[in-house]
Amino acid sequence: MKYNILITDILIKDFVDVYKKDFSVDCLWKLKRKIDFNKYQGIVVTGGFKTDKKFLKKFKNLKIVSVFGVGYDGVDLNYCKNNKIVITNTPKVLTDDVADLALGLMMSLSRRINEAHNFILKKKWSKKPFELTTSLTNKTVGIVGMGEIGKAFSKRVKSTFYENCLFWTK
C-alpha cells in the first residue's frame, strides 16, 4: 500500500515525479474537487507555506510534514509534537548555492558589473571610458552570522581575495 501525500506548493515536475515513485501523490494546486484531508498520511510543504494549527487540524491521519527546503518556521512545531507528527526538512541543501551567490553578488557590486553592462549596451563607451572599479584583493570582509551559510561563505572569501575575514554571531 502506498501512502497518500499532499504536496501543497508548486514544485518542479521532476521533484513531484520522484515522490510519485513511492507515494500516491496529489498536488494541491491541481485539485479541482473538494479535498478529503483525512486520506493523507503526509504533506510536503515549502518554507513559505503557512502550516499552522488550523491547517494541520484538517488532517486526522497525518504522520509527517516534510518541508521541501531548509526553513520550517512556517510549521506549528508544538501542534506536531503534541500530535506525534514527524517534521523533516533538508538542511544544508542550499548552503553552497547561497554562499556562491553571496560571493558572486559581492564581486558584481565591487566591480559594478551591471553598470558596466548597461554602459556598453547604451554605447557610452565610445564617448568616455567606464570609471575604475574597486578591487576586492586585500580587503576586509565582515560576515554577520556564522551558521552553515556563513561558514561556507567564509571559506570562499578566505580562498579568494581577502586578508581579513571578520564575523559576528550569537
Image (cartoon, rainbow, N blue to C red):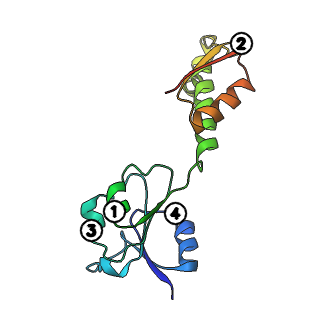
Instruction: Please name whichever residue, 165 or 162, is drawn nearer the observer in this view of the structure.
Output: 165
Q: Which residue is mark 4?
A: 12
Residue type pointed to by label 3? Lys
* Image spot of residue 80 (x, y percent): 36, 62
Say which of marks 4 and 3 sits in front: 3
- Which residue is depicted at the point 51% across and 84% down? 2
Q: CA distance from mark 4 to mark 3?
A: 27 Å
- Which residue is depicted at the point 40% across and 62% down? 9
Q: Does residue 74 appear left or right of residue 127 in this picture?
A: left
Q: CA distance from mark 4 to mark 1?
A: 32 Å
Residue type pointed to by label 4? Ile
Say which of marks 3 and 1 sits in front: 1
Lower sequence index among marks 2 and 4:
4
Say which of marks 4 and 1 sits in front: 1
Q: Which mark is residue 82?
A: 1
Determine whether label 4 and label 1 are within 8 Å by CB.
no
Q: Which residue is mark 3?
A: 57
Q: CA distance from mark 2 to mark 4?
A: 42 Å
Q: Secondary structure at mark 4?
A: loop
